[in-house]
Image (cartoon, rainbow, N blue to C red):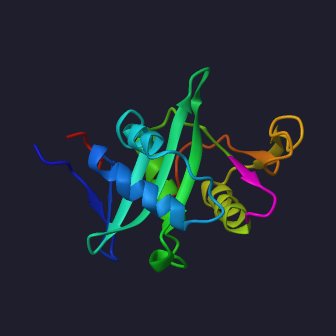
Amino acid sequence: MSEITNTDQNNILFRKPNSTDGNRVFKLINECKPLDVNSMYCNLLQCTHFRDTAILAESQGQLAGFVSGYRVPDQPDVLFVWQVAVAPHARGQGLASQMLTRLIEQQGPLIRFVHTSITATNEASWSTFRRLARDLGAELATEVMFDQQQHFGGAHATETLVSIGPFAKTATPSLEPLEKQ
């Protein structure tokens, strides 16, 4: 059975990732500074074990973007967005916002909050998540999640927890579900 996907008006194909996408996701994230590069094994797990909380975007057969996330175990109404990656050739078209909105919609009405962490200097991510909060009509709150000294021993910039919500549902019309293979 083939997987059902969504295509937008710009012929961007949105779908859940699968095991064969892990290598492409790994290469994409390597192109997307300042994102932290995880092991390829981690990306394979994101594309398999966490595929229901991830979305992949393709344009003309090329990987254009990827969002990974997970439902917070002790907060079932929270979707934590781990990484948002947009290929250099696909930037400036609102693809990150489109992927996030579609992913939230796919999670259904039980999701009332989106969390992520962002370093102070990652302006692209700040812009994307401020826009998401605005589009969802939800408040955006911040607090330190992982401190540069206390948690990273000075080896990484402080990660700020961004919390968006509560929201009832996304500002977009209902999308067709991205079904499993």
Q: Is residue 154 above or below residue 128?
A: above
Determine the residue positioned at 56% across, 65% down.
32
Q: How many marks?
A: 0
Looking at the rendered image, the quarter that the C terminus falls into is top left
Q: Is residue 44 above or below residue 60?
A: above
Q: Is residue 118 magenta?
A: yes
15 or 88, which is in the foreground?
Answer: 88
Q: Does 140 sit left or right of 111 as displayed? A: right
Highlighted range, magenta: 117-122
Q: Is residue 88 magenta?
A: no
Looking at the rendered image, the quarter that the N terminus falls into is top left
174 or 104, which is in the foreground?
Answer: 104
Residue most toward the right? 149
Determine the residue positioned at 42% across, 36% down.
50
Determine the residue positioned at 73% across, 63% down.
122
- Residue 140 percent location from the top left of the image: 75, 50
- Residue 151 percent location from the top left of the image: 82, 35
- Residue 116 percent location from the top left of the image: 66, 46
Residue most toward the top? 74
Q: Does 131 sit left or right of 43 as displayed? A: right
Determine the residue positioned at 64% across, 63% down.
128
Is residue 173 visible from the viewing direction of this image?
no
150 or 96, which is in the foreground?
Answer: 150
Q: Does 150 sit left or right of 112 as displayed? A: right
Is residue 113 visible from the viewing direction of this image?
yes
